[in-house]
């Protein structure tokens, strides 16, 4: 990662103990001195102080200020913002809309100058049809709120699907009952590929999401008021399968394919039944239909991240470790 000389920043992380939040928090803290972060804070709930004490204690030992409060209470948020010029939100999909109030408070706060929302994932402005996708609606409202701010700068760090094996992510092993929506199961040596197995997809490891956020923070001019479309690598479902086969001994896996039309039917049924799988199915359909490909718009180089990212090989290696424990 290329880190230019940049003015000191005081960073407050919100939602920094969740699935993606831990990776972003770790990356920011690890880059503290090289990136000239003078002060780093974590705003979290009182409950999280106990449920994730191991992570909170680690951050505190590394010099992070832990601020407990309720992001639903404006007074708590205003108090937490004091002394911080940059807010990095890593909140989960279920509370994306809560950022609307966080942004409103930030825009009126005398200390806050810049806001990075929880945008990590699928590009919500990829094509003319993106604005109608149901999973995109909350993030689109967040984008509109930031664009309407009087003086608050912003950056959307867009990364596409996560190339990791945590449950539900692209390189994970799905339970047999739901594997039709995609799976790379190391223990069973069974894969279910989505869409056209030879159609390209952009993927980003969660480790790299953290690095990309740091890079965006370190390039305030290049990242100002724009979406940065970034990724670790571009590949195909078939190439992912081949890499899993190679790294698990070279033998052929059992393989099924859920084509795009079948995926659309699964998605339609899930929304009709108000099934919790509706959003994940919509996202997987978008990814399988070319919705992660940036073409010449890839922005890694804009923020000094043209190298120093994971490869397909390293992502699969890590996924295997996660799956086999």
Image (cartoon, rainbow, N blue to C red):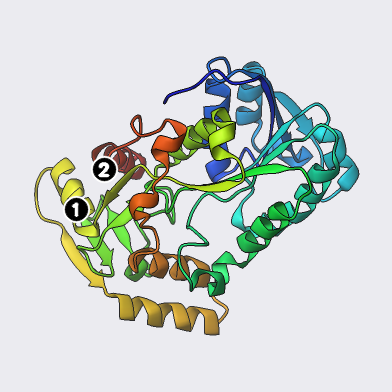
Disc 2 is placed on an element classified as helix
Per the rendering, the mark at residue 138 is none
Q: For the residue carrying disc 2, how many other residues have a C-alpha within 10 Å: few (<14), some (14-19), or many (20+)?
A: many
Q: Where is residue 63 in the image (x, y as percent from the top left)?
A: 66, 17
Per the rendering, the mark at residue 312 is 2
283 relative to 145 in the view: left or right: left
Q: Are marks 1 and 2 in contact (CB under 8 Å)?
A: yes
Q: Residue at x 76, y 29 (%)?
A: 84
Q: Which numbered disc flags the more N-terminal residue, 1 or 2?
A: 1
**Frontmost residue, 219 versus 101:** 219
167 relative to 240 in the view: left or right: right
94 relative to 241 in the view: left or right: right
Tell me how far mark 1 sits from mark 2, CA to CA. Answer: 9 Å
Q: For the residue carrying disc 1, how many other residues have a C-alpha within 10 Å: few (<14), some (14-19), or many (20+)?
A: some
Q: Position of residue 302 (x, y in %)?
A: 44, 37
Disc 1 is placed on an element classified as helix
Q: Where is residue 129 in the image (x, y as percent from the top left)?
A: 48, 73
Image quadrant in which the C terminus is located: top left
Q: Residue at x 29, y 42 (%)?
A: 320
């Amino acid at each position: 990662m290329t880190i230019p000389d940049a003015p000191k920043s005081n960073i407050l992380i919100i939602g920094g103990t969740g699935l993606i939040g831990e990776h972003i928090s770790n990356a920011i803290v690890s880059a503290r001195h090289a990136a000239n972060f003078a002060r780093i804070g974590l705003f979290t709930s009182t409950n999280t102080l106990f449920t994730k004490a191991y992570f909170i204690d680690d951050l505190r030992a590394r010099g992070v200020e832990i601020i407990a409060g309720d992001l639903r209470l404006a007074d708590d948020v205003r108090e937490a913002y004091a002394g911080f010029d940059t807010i990095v939100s890593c909140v989960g999909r279920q509370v994306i809309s809560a950022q609307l109030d966080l942004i409103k408070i930030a825009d009126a706060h005398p200390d806050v100058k810049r806001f990075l929302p929880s945008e990590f994932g699928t590009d919500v402005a990829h094509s003319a049809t993106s604005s109608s996708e149901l999973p995109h609606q909350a993030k689109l409202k967040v984008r509109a709120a930031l664009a309407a701010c009087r003086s608050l700068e912003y950056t959307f760090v867009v990364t596409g699907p996560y190339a990791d094996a945590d449950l539900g992510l692209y390189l994970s092993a799905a339970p047999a009952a739901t594997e039709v929506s995609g799976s790379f199961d190391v223990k069973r040596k069974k894969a279910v590929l989505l869409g056209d197995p030879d159609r390209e997809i952009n993927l980003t490891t969660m480790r790299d999401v953290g690095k990309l956020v740091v890079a965006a923070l370190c390039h305030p001019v290049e990242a100002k008021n724009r979406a940065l479309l970034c990724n670790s690598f571009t590949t195909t479902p078939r190439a992912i399968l081949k890499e899993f086969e190679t790294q698990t001994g070279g033998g052929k896996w059992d393989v099924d394919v859920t084509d795009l039309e079948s995926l659309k039917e699964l998605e339609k049924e899930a929304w009709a039944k108000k099934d919790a799988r509706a959003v994940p199915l919509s996202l997987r359909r978008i990814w399988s239909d070319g919705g992660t490909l940036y073409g010449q718009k890839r922005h890694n180089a804009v923020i000094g991240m043209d190298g120093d990212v994971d490869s397909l090989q390293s992502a699969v290696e890590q996924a295997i470790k996660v799956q086999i424990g």
